[in-house]
C-alpha cells in the first residue's frame, strides 16, 4: 500500500453561499409580487400578470442554478482527484496536482450523473414553489370573491381585515415552504438547496477520489482525521477497501454505516 499523505478537505462555503443568494433574491422578488396583489378585490388580469412575473423569476432562478451546478460539481470532482494524486505521492503540491488532473471514464460518468441528479433535485424546489404559490393565489382569489359576495365591498370591518391577514399569511407560507422530503420534513427552499448541493459536492469529491485511486491500482484508502466529536471519530485513521474484491481484513468503504461516516 502506498504511503498516505493527508491534505485538508476542501470546503465550498463561499461557493454555496452564492447559490443560496440566488434563492434569497428569487424568494424576495416573489414575495414582492405577491404583496402587490390587491386582496380586497382580485382581478383576473392582475392575477395572471402576477403569475407570469413569478414564472419569469423562477425561470431566471433555474438558469442561474443550472449554471452554478455545471461549474461547481465538476470542481468538486477535480478536488477529489487532486486529493488522490497527492495521497498516492504522485506529486507534492496541490498546484502540481491540478496541472495533471484528468477525469477517467468512471469520473466522467460520475460528473454527468451528479450534475443531472443535482439539477433534478433543485428543479423540484422551483417547481414546488411555483405549484404552492399558484395554489395559494387560487385560494386567495376564491376567498376574495366569497368575501366580496357576502360582505360587499366594505373592506374596513375587522372581519375582512382578519381575512386579508390570513390570505397574506398563506401566500407567504407558500413561498417559505418549498419542498417536503421523504421523511415528511418541511424545508425552506434555500435551506433545502444548500443541503442538497453540500451533500452532493461532498459525495462527488469522495467518489472521484476513489475512482482516481482505483484507476491508479490503489485498492485501499484511509479515513481522514479531523478531530470529529460525533460517531465519525470511531473511523478516523482507519484503513478501508476501495473495492470489495481487495485483499485483507479491512471494511469496504461502500458498506460503512452512513450514520457514522460521510454524513
Image (cartoon, rainbow, N blue to C red):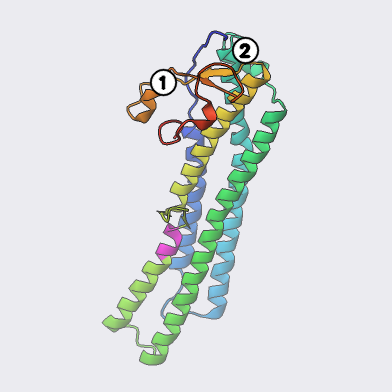
Can residue 240 be seen here? The reply is: yes
Residue, x 43% and y 81% (percent of image)?
Answer: 144
**Tag on residue 236?**
1
**Tag on residue 96?**
2
Q: Which residues are magenta?
A: 172-177
- Give the image location of residue 184, x and y in percent: 42, 56
Q: Main secondary structure of the magenta part?
A: helix
Mark nearest the camera among 1 and 2 is 1
Which tag, 1 or 2, sits closer to the chain's start? 2
Q: On screen, 65 above or below 217? A: below
Distance from disc 1 to disc 2, alpha carbons, whole Å, reads 27 Å
**Tag on residue 51?**
none
Can residue 41 be seen here? The reply is: no
- Give the image location of residue 55, x and y in percent: 59, 62
Tell whether label 2 touches label 1 (CB within 8 Å).
no
Q: On screen, 121 above or below 218? A: below
In the image, taking residue 209 as reference, residue 228 lies left or right, namely left
Amino acid at each position: 500500500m502506498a504511503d498516505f499523505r493527508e491534505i485538508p478537505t476542501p470546503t465550498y462555503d463561499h461557493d454555496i453561499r452564492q447559490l443560496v443568494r440566488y434563492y434569497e433574491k428569487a424568494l424576495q422578488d416573489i414575495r414582492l409580487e405577491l404583496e402587490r396583489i390587491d386582496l380586497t378585490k382580485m382581478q383576473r388580469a392582475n392575477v395572471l400578470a402576477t403569475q407570469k412575473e413569478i414564472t419569469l423569476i423562477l425561470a431566471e432562478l433555474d438558469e442561474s442554478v443550472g449554471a452554478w451546478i455545471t461549474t461547481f460539481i465538476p470542481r468538486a470532482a477535480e478536488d477529489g482527484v487532486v486529493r488522490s494524486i497527492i495521497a498516492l505521492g504522485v506529486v507534492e503540491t496541490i498546484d502540481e496536482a491540478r496541472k495533471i488532473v484528468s477525469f477517467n471514464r468512471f469520473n466522467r460518468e460520475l460528473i454527468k450523473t451528479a450534475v443531472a441528479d443535482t439539477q433534478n433535485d433543485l428543479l423540484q424546489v422551483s417547481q414546488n414553489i411555483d405549484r404552492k404559490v399558484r395554489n395559494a393565489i387560487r385560494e386567495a382569489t376564491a376567498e376574495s370573491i366569497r368575501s366580496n359576495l357576502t360582505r360587499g365591498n366594505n373592506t374596513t370591518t375587522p372581519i375582512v381585515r382578519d381575512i386579508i391577514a390570513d390570505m397574506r399569511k398563506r401566500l407567504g407560507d407558500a413561498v417559505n415552504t418549498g419542498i417536503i422530503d421523504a421523511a415528511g420534513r418541511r424545508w425552506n427552499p434555500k435551506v433545502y438547496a444548500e443541503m442538497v448541493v453540500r451533500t452532493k459536492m461532498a459525495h462527488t469529491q469522495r467518489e472521484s477520489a476513489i475512482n482516481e485511486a482505483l484507476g491508479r491500482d490503489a485498492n485501499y484508502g484511509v479515513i481522514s482525521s479531523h478531530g470529529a466529536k460525533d460517531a465519525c471519530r470511531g473511523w478516523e485513521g482507519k484503513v478501508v477497501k476501495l473495492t470489495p474484491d481487495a485483499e485483507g481484513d479491512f471494511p469496504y468503504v461502500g458498506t460503512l454505516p452512513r450514520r457514522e461516516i460521510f454524513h
